[in-house]
Structures are given as structure tokens and as C-alpha cells.
């Protein structure tokens, strides 16, 4: 069976400097992957054998690399692919109204102690590849014309604390941020996608951009991949790529919105059973996604004691509306007795 290559797969091959002639032999490319391949195709007139040849992988870098090596990496085709990914995720965040003004920031780990990140004071919906910044894990800027995001320390502290984190995403999705302002973790046992892909906790508020804020978030990333930042927003990390970090935002925001709609319907939510949730957690664990519930007993899985829906139905239950009313029955009997007495 032929292997199917997506645009994301192809971009990863290009980033790693793979020989596309070999990698794409007997493979089927999706339409978007073909577009990526065309963008990396030599100019018209080049020999056919050179058409799918990827650029040479740049030299691995660290914060101690010579300035020339850092600049070479920052200006390499491989880094340009990652810059475009940051711009793409920024447009998605802005298009879904997960960011406002120039809020939000994104980062990708590109070396042992080096990351590529978004700039400060630029709308996430209108970033360009040349706007991106290269920083070390202390927040020092190593390359880039624009100044790096002011909240990069939080992203870097996540990457330092959680070695699996290869990308991070921070934004302010309204429904999720509502839970963050209330200091509540969304209730569980309702929707499979949320249970499998997100593991949520709340970090106390500190001034955005400070080491203290980053520290409180980093303290939670061993067992959680999505953190509600009290009175601020949300940050997520992924062990796969930056798109996966963004997906967690979509999943969380859709879930929080659904939970709030459910709370307004006036009936208790129909939650999953413990065995059903246990099945989802097994899938989650197989995907390498952390969750503090891994290994718990079934009776400990669904704990929604903090969840107090604020809206309930004002109508009385149907049984009360059509049931027996002793006072009304007595009044009817008294009136009937009076009419019978008068008739006599």
C-alpha cells in the first residue's frame, strides 16, 4: 500500500533536509502537499532529477553557537518553513477571535536551548516570516529584526520544565478564558475529544510576562498540556508540533462553549460512565498525552465538585404541574357542599 504524504509531512521532510526523491518514491501526495512541493521546485528549465531535491539541512544550533551559525540557521529554508507555520497559526488564532489587538504568542523549539517565537506588538493575524525572532532559553534575542514577544519567558520555562514540549501556544479564547477568570477547571466526562487530547489545570494569576507567571505555569506541565491562566488566558504545549499545540485551543474552546450551553438547558448533563472514560484515557496514554488521572480507579475519575451551573430552568417539573393538590381539592369540596345545602 502506497504511503499518503500530507503537506505537514512534506514540510517536516524539508525541515529535516531529507532527499525528497527517495522519500516520495511510490508515495501519494495530497493536493496541499503538491502545493508545498511546487513551492520547493527549482525554476523552469532545471533537470527533472533535481525537481524534488530538498535544501540541505542547516547545522544544529545552541545558544553557544557562533553568531554566523545562528544567522545562517535563522535565514535557512528549513527555518523559513517554521516561520511560515508560526504565521499560519497566528492567522488561525486571529480568525477565530482567540486573540485581540496584538495579544497572544507562539514558540517552536529549534535547538537544545533555542526557540523561534513571534514578535511583540504585532497582530497575530498579520505576521510575516521576516517578523519572527530567535531566542535562547533565558529570553535573550539571538536573531531577528523585530523584538521578541514579552511573554516568551513563560514559553521557555515550559520547554525547560517539560522536555517533550516542542511547541507552545498562548491566546485568549473567550469561553475558555471565562473559566480562567472564574478559576474553574471545566467539568469532565462529557465529550471524547476533550478527554483524549486536553489535560487542563488552572495557574494562579501573576503579571503577564514575569518569571513568576511562567513559574506557576511550568509547575503544572508535567501532568497537564493546557493551562488556564487565571484572569488572563490559556497556554498549551505539544510534543508533536505547533499545529497540535494550536489544536488544543480549538478543542478546549469548543468544549467550554458546549459546557456553558449545556448548563442553560435546565437539565443535568448526561455524563460518561467511569468505564467509558477509562477507555478514552487508555487512548490518551497511548498517544503520549499526560493526564493526572492515568492509573486512577474508576470511582476517582469524574470529580466535578467545583462545577456549579449558574442557570437552571425556572419551570416546575411536569409531575408537580399535573399532580394532586390537597388544598384545591378541599376548596372544591367545601363549595360543592355549600351548593348542595342551598339546593335542599
Image: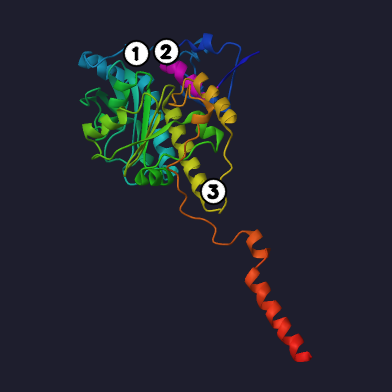
- Image quadrant where residue 269 sits: top right
**In the rendered structure, which segment of residues is drawn in magenta?**
6-15
Q: Which mark is residue 58?
A: 1
Q: Is residue 124 magenta?
A: no
Q: Nearer the viewer, mark 3 or mark 1?
A: 3
Q: Residues within 10 Å of mark 2 (few under 14, many from 20)?
A: some
Q: Are the two marked residues, 3 and 1, in contact with CB atoms closer than 8 angstroms?
A: no
Q: Are the two marked residues, 2 and 1, in contact with CB atoms closer than 8 angstroms?
A: yes
Q: Main secondary structure of the magenta part?
A: helix
Q: CA distance from mark 2 to mark 3?
A: 49 Å
Q: Which residue appears at 68% of the width and 72% of the height? A: 329
Q: Which residue appears at 61% of the width and 12% of the height? A: 26
Tell me residue 236's x, y (percent): 39, 31
Tell me residue 17's x, y (percent): 42, 13
Query: Is 288 left, or right, of 218 in this rendering?
Result: right
Secondary structure under badge 2? loop
Q: Residues within 10 Å of mark 1 (few under 14, many from 20)?
A: some
Q: Nearer the viewer, residue 213 or 326?
A: 326
Tell me residue 188's x, y (percent): 50, 37
Identify the residue under disc 2: 17
**Where does the N terminus fall, quadrant-wise?**
top right
Query: Is 218 left, or right, of 240 in this rendering?
Result: left
Q: Nearer the viewer, mark 2 or mark 3?
A: 3
Total marks placed: 3
Work out whether residue 115 can be spotted. yes
Q: CA distance from mark 2 to mark 1?
A: 8 Å
Identify the residue under disc 3: 262
Q: Nearer the viewer, residue 65 or 232?
A: 232
Q: Which residue appears at 35% of the width and 46% of the height? A: 181
Query: Is 205 left, or right, of 56 in this rendering?
Result: left
Amino acid at each position: 500500500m502506497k504511503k499518503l504524504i500530507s503537506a505537514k509531512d512534506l514540510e517536516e521532510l524539508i525541515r529535516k533536509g531529507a532527499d525528497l526523491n527517495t522519500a516520495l518514491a511510490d508515495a501519494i501526495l495530497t493536493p496541499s502537499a503538491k502545493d508545498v512541493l511546487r513551492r520547493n521546485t527549482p525554476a523552469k528549465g532545471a533537470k527533472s532529477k533535481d525537481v524534488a531535491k530538498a535544501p540541505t539541512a542547516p547545522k544544529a544550533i545552541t545558544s553557544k553557537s557562533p553568531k554566523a551559525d545562528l544567522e545562517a540557521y535563522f535565514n535557512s529554508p528549513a527555518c523559513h518553513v517554521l516561520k511560515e507555520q508560526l504565521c499560519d497559526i497566528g492567522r488561525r488564532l486571529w480568525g477565530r477571535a482567540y486573540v485581540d489587538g496584538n495579544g497572544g504568542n507562539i514558540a517552536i523549539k529549534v535547538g537544545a536551548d533555542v526557540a523561534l517565537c513571534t514578535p511583540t506588538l504585532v497582530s497575530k493575524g498579520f505576521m510575516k516570516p521576516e517578523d519572527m525572532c530567535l531566542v535562547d532559553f533565558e529570553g535573550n534575542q539571538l536573531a531577528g529584526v523585530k523584538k521578541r514577544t514579552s511573554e516568551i519567558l513563560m514559553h521557555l520555562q515550559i520547554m525547560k520544565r517539560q522536555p517533550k514540549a516542542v511547541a507552545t501556544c498562548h491566546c485568549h479564547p473567550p469561553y475558555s478564558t471565562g473559566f480562567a477568570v472564574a478559576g474553574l477547571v471545566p467539568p469532565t466526562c462529557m465529550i471524547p475529544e476533550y478527554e483524549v487530547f486536553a489535560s487542563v489545570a488552572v495557574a494562579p494569576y501573576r503579571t503577564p510576562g514575569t518569571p513568576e507567571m511562567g513559574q506557576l505555569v511550568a509547575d503544572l506541565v508535567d501532568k497537564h498540556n493546557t493551562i488556564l491562566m487565571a484572569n488572563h488566558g490559556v497556554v498549551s504545549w505539544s510534543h508533536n508540533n505547533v499545529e497540535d499545540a494550536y489544536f488544543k485551543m480549538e478543542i478546549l474552546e469548543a468544549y467550554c462553549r458546549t459546557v456553558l450551553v449545556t448548563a442553560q438547558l435546565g437539565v443535568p448533563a448526561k455524563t460518561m460512565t467511569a468505564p467509558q472514560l477509562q477507555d478514552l484515557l487508555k487512548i490518551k496514554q497511548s498517544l503520549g498525552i499526560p493526564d493526572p488521572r492515568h492509573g486512577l480507579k474508576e470511582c476517582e475519575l469524574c470529580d466535578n465538585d467545583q462545577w456549579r451551573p449558574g442557570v437552571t430552568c425556572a419551570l416546575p417539573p411536569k409531575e408537580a404541574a399535573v399532580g394532586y393538590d390537597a388544598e384545591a381539592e378541599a376548596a372544591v369540596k367545601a363549595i360543592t357542599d355549600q351548593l348542595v345545602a342551598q339546593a335542599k
